[in-house]
Amino acid sequence: MQDGIVWQEKDGCTIEHDTDSHIQSQIASMAKKHDAYEHSDKSKPLIAPINSLPAGQSYGRWAAEWWQWALGTPAAVNPVLDTTGEYCTQRQVDGVWFLAGSFSSDPVTRNCNIPAGKSLFFPLINKGYVAYLNDPANTRTEDFIRAAGSCTEPAHITVRIDGYNVPKPTQFFTGESGSQSPFFNIQLPPNNVFGDDGTGIPELLLSPSAEQGYYLFVQPLSSGAHTIHFTASGCNSDGLTQDITYNLIVLP
């Protein structure tokens, strides 16, 4: 691993490693007793409002967990690097499945089988900043990291689920105006997407980290075939765009 840009990425973002050993990525009312959703028409996908607690957590908390999933999966089977859907089942647990964008602007189509009853959470475009343990103290403060991990450009997003155009997708924002994500840590695995063995990244730990972006939490889809397609640009200033299609089969 060397200084300078290490990786173009992010589910709509970019990962950089600068000369100060930083990584910048550019790769999403609280609910009552029950989860609330944007649509009640059964013909439409059911999308959790940004101010709700789908599956017991805020959008911001799910976004932090998504980053831990995306960067915590080895490169050889990483779903963000995956261009076919072969690795969509990696590190999926419990009732919420993560989907991914891409580390490049090239269109990606993935085919994936999903067990019945799984909600979906995925970024449309986002940005993150993670610090190394040996970074200078002034670049490890909450103010510095929060600012470095914030979107700097307006986002332009379209989302279509089974022919339904999701209205105003930029409302699903994990910044202050939506559901701000907490600070979080990421434990990298050996053979991680950065290709680092712990020499450049002490203990393979990215801490603390912050992010900001646009995400969707979709209630479980019915059994059968479904298609999710989204395009996105903005949030970060590196010009990375997203054009992602998931052809899903929800198993009986």
Image: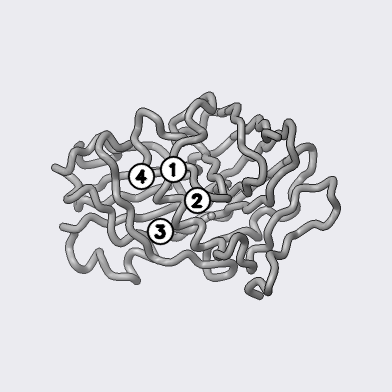
The reply, left or right, for residue 221 in relation to residue 101 is right
Q: How is this picture coloured?
A: one colour
Percent x, y of residue 8: 39, 37
Question: Please, what is the three-letter code of the amino acid marked with disc 2?
Answer: Asn
Q: CA distance from mark 1 to mark 4?
A: 13 Å
Residue position marked by numbered label 4 in the rendering: 72
Disc 1 secondary structure class: loop
Question: Please, what is the three-letter code of the amino acid marked with disc 1?
Answer: Ile
- Against 87, residue 166 (above or below) is below
Specify whether residue 151 is in view.
no
Q: Quadrant of residue 115?
A: top right
User: Who's the residue at 28% across and 53% down the image?
Assistant: 206
Question: Please, what is the three-letter code of the amino acid marked with disc 3?
Answer: Gly
Q: CA distance from mark 3 to mark 4?
A: 18 Å
Q: Residue furthest front?
A: 252
Residue position marked by numbered label 2 in the rendering: 126
Residue position marked by numbered label 3 in the rendering: 149
Disc 2 secondary structure class: strand
User: Who's the residue at 68% across and 35% down the image?
Assistant: 250
Q: Looking at the rendering, in which quadrant would you find the C terminus? A: top right
Q: CA distance from mark 2 to mark 3?
A: 9 Å
Binning the other alpha carbons within 10 Å of mark 3 as few (below 14), some (14 to 19) or many (20 upward) gives: many
Percent x, y of residue 71: 37, 44
User: Who's the residue at 33% across and 36% down the image?
Assistant: 193
User: Who's the residue at 22% across and 38% down the image?
Assistant: 196
Residue position marked by numbered label 1 in the rendering: 27
Q: CA distance from mark 3 to mark 1?
A: 12 Å
Binning the other alpha carbons within 10 Å of mark 2 as few (below 14), some (14 to 19) or many (20 upward) gives: many
Q: Is the Cβ of the residue at disc 1 closer than 8 Å to that at disc 2?
A: yes
- Against 126, residue 113 (above or below) is above
* First in residue order: circle 4 vs circle 2: 4
Q: CA distance from mark 4 to mark 2?
A: 17 Å
